Image (cartoon, rainbow, N blue to C red):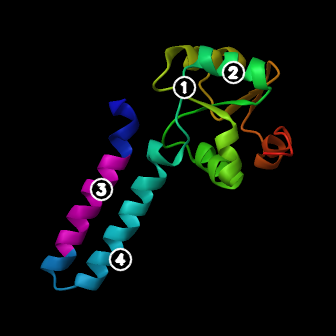
Amino acid sequence: MMRAWILPMLLVLSGSAVAAGQIFLGSPRTAGALLLAFLTLAGVNSPLIFPRSISAPEAQRRSAVDGRPVVFWRPGCKYCIRLRIRLGRRARQLHWVNIWRDPAGAAAVRTANDGNETVPTVIVAGQPRTNPDPEWVRGQLSPSG
């Protein structure tokens, strides 16, 4: 759990230090803008923008029942962030597995990617797809969602 928050915490601390330096130099507006930029980066790289993660076995069980794709991801991955943002509200229809929190999820990703933990890896009907186009993923969802 802690590993997922290292980058966001570093961004918040760095932004705070930079902003404090700007305030010390007499530039409060610059300090505010920089702090806002760092906080935005921290938020985008945090687990908060992703739907609640579940375990790999639970995601696979749910996917077998409802046919929805399983997405294996990790915090800080720019391709995972791109996928999440481009899916918009439809991202909540997918089953998300954070490989940093779930060893079985990390093992599933390694199996699908020749031993590498390359994310995002999306599994649809038992077939893995590594770093798929967000439009392809959206096409795997039912039109009623």
Q: CA distance from mark 3 to mark 2?
A: 36 Å
The answer to whether 31 appears left or right of 4 in the picture is left
Q: Which range is magenta?
A: 8-21
User: Which of the two labelled residues, at mark 2 and mark 4, occupies the earlier sequence position?
Assistant: 4
Residue flagged by tag 3: what amino acid is it? Answer: Val
Q: Which residue is mark 2?
A: 62
Seen in the picture, residue 127 relative to 98 is either above or below; the reply is above
Q: Which residue is mark 4?
A: 33
User: Which of the two labelled residues, at mark 3 and mark 2, occupies the earlier sequence position?
Assistant: 3
Q: Which disc, if any, is residue 21? A: none
The answer to whether 123 appears left or right of 75 in the picture is right
The question of residue 108 being in magenta is answered with: no
The image shows residue 82 at horizontal and vertical percentages of 64, 51
Residue flagged by tag 1: what amino acid is it? Answer: Ile
Q: Residue at x 53, y 31 (%)?
A: 53
Task: Give the residue at the far left of this rendering.
Answer: 24
User: Which of the two labelled residues, at mark 1 and mark 4, occupies the earlier sequence position?
Assistant: 4
Helix, strand or loop at disc 2? helix
The answer to whether 58 appears left or right of 4 in the picture is right
Q: Which disc, if any, is residue 12? A: 3
Classify residue 113 by image quadrant.
top right
The image shows residue 120 at horizontal and vertical percentages of 65, 35
Q: How many marks?
A: 4
The image shows residue 1 at horizontal and vertical percentages of 37, 29
Q: Which residue is mark 1?
A: 54
Residue flagged by tag 4: what amino acid is it? Answer: Ala
Residue flagged by tag 2: what amino acid is it? Answer: Arg
User: Which of the two labelled residues, at mark 4 and mark 3, occupies the earlier sequence position?
Assistant: 3
